[in-house]
Structures are given as structure tokens and as C-alpha cells.
Image (cartoon, rainbow, N blue to C red):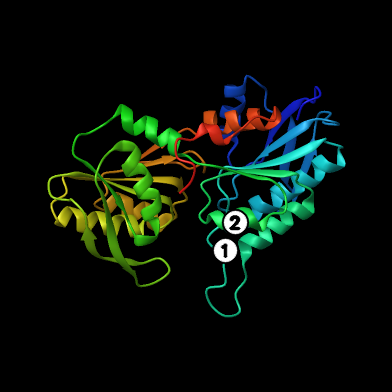
Amino acid sequence: MQNGTGLKIFSGKSNLPLAQEICSYLGASLGDALVTSFPDSESFVRFNENIRGTDVFLVQSTSSPANHNVMELLIMIDAAKRASAARVTAVLPFFGYARQDRKDQPRVPITSKLVANLLVAAGVNRVLTMDLHAQQIQGFFDIPVDHLYASPVFFDELRSNAVSNLTIFSPDVGGMKMANAYSEVLGCPLGFVAKRRTGASTVEAMNLVGEVEGREILLVDDMTETAGTLTAAAKLLKERGAQKVSALVSHCVLNQTGKDRLRNGNLDELITTNSVHMDTEDLPIRQLSVAPLLGEAIKRTHTDNSISTLFEVKGF
């Protein structure tokens, strides 16, 4: 947005540290806003500075507690529009409800479409998000959606810690497109795990296709919550002679079951981003910051420059 319109960034409560990092990258100060809850848990937002005619970016991951964080973002959008912001962009490093993107059984909702409708109804002008679980969610919006990929951050990390005997594995057939992209960029073999899911949170890994014996394996996926897929795959890979098994996921939204599995499982390391704020405690997790990536995307959005040129691989 040109014509001298000012840029202001505000944050909800879901991932304040990431918002502060983004502002640090841009050399800007985080906007002054009161984001709080009443005793009955209703959310309240007040912008403590003038945003009339400005280009406003609201940073909020809609991770757990998803309902609260979605509602908080909607209220922030409404408050910004009523304060006469020239444009409001919702920056969702993690887009919650993305797994509910289709009717896969009778009488169920398409909740990711509902969330898209709510954001538009609240008055948001555009959305900036990263590594959607299902890319077709972009089509649920009738406003511009900029879909970023965490891959540049991961590629830099993997290249700086390159190993000669690495094999990229997809934990399931559905993730082969993403795994193949990593395999091509890093120039290493590709494989996948054939799995059978026995419940919503339980997975039984079944078979392997690819080079495993004596190799370091990197499992690539978009997100993990219970770590069932990753730890089951790691167990099978080590049984088949893998030297080391690590995993790389864009979004780490671990619940207690997932944390327990990581502590007791066969996964040597989980590499992820800080799209979701979490305490890694004693877990084998290494977080990489996506603040420069998001910050650059915000800057290019504000100045009406291309975002797609940030990526070696244009999509998975």
C-alpha cells in the first residue's frame, strides 16, 4: 500500500514473542493495544494509538485454545476497521481448523471455510498465512490470500548442517509432494512410509519404500499434534537399520500425548518453526524462527512487491 500510508503491526496473545521478532526484523515497534479478557472469559480489544488511514497487520496464530484465539482475532479486526484503518491484514503463522477442509463423512461441517467466512465478515482485507494443511483453503476466501512456505528457513538450516547419507522420507503417501520437493532441492534419495491409521490419534506404521539401512532419515510433514505418525514411522525406520531419525514439521501443536511420545519415542530430534508458541521443556525439539520470512512478506505486502520470489519451490 503506497501513497505514504503508515505501517503498524499489532499482536494478539497467542504468539506475542513471534510478533516482537517480526517487528525487530522490520525495525519497527509493536503497536500499542490492549488485548485482554473479562472475568467471564469474553475477549476485549482496544487500540491505544491512532490507526486512522494506516496499513494494519494483526499477528495471531489460531492454535490452542483455537476458539478463543479465533474470536480474539475477529474482535481485533472489527476494532481496527471501526478505528478507520485503511487496510487490515490478518497474519496467521498457523491457520487453525485447516484439517476440517472437506466433508469426509455425512453431517459434518467444513470448519475451515466457516473460519474464512468469519474473517471476511469481520472486515479483513487480506490474509497472510504459512504452510496451510490443505492448499485449497486459499480458495475459501474471496479476498487475497498470500500463502507462505517455511521451506526457505528449513533449507538454510539443512544446508548448513548437511550430511552425506541423508534420505528424505514422507510419513505417508499424501505427503510425497512435499517430501519430493525437499529431496530435489537437497539432492538426496526419497522414500515413504505406508501407514494405517487405527484412530483419530493412533497410527500403526506398516511398511517402507526407500533407502534406510545405515542412513540418517529426515521425515517431512506439515504439522504434528499427537506425534503418532512420526514416532510410529521412526520406530519402524530404526527397526530397519536407520542410523538416526529426525523429523521436520512446519507447525508443532503438540498436546500432552504428543509430548509423552516424543520423550519416550524413537525420534532423535524434531525440527520445527515458532509459528506456534510453546514451551519445549525437556523435549528433543529445535525451533527455527520464521520472523524474518513473515517480516519480509509483511514489508512486501505493504510496498506492493512480489512475495512469490521469496521461494525456491513455489508450492507443495
Point 75% across, 53% down: residue: 120
Tag 2 and tag 1, C-beta contact below 8 Å: yes
Amino acid tagged 2: Ile
Residue 150, x across and y down, in percent = 47, 39
Point 62% across, 26% down: residue: 23
Work out whether mark 2 precedes mark 1 in sequence or the reverse, and give the earlier one: 1
Locate residue 207 relative to residue 106 in the image: left or right. Answer: left
Point 52% across, 56% down: residue: 134
Q: Residues within 10 Å of mark 1 (few under 14, many from 20)?
A: some
Residue linked to disc 2: 137
Residue 171, x across and y down, in percent = 32, 56
161 or 64: nearer the viewer: 161
The N terminus sits in image quarter: top right
54 or 37: nearer the viewer: 54
**As displayed, is residue 207 above or below residue 222?**
below
Q: Secondary structure at mark 2?
A: helix
Residue linked to disc 1: 101
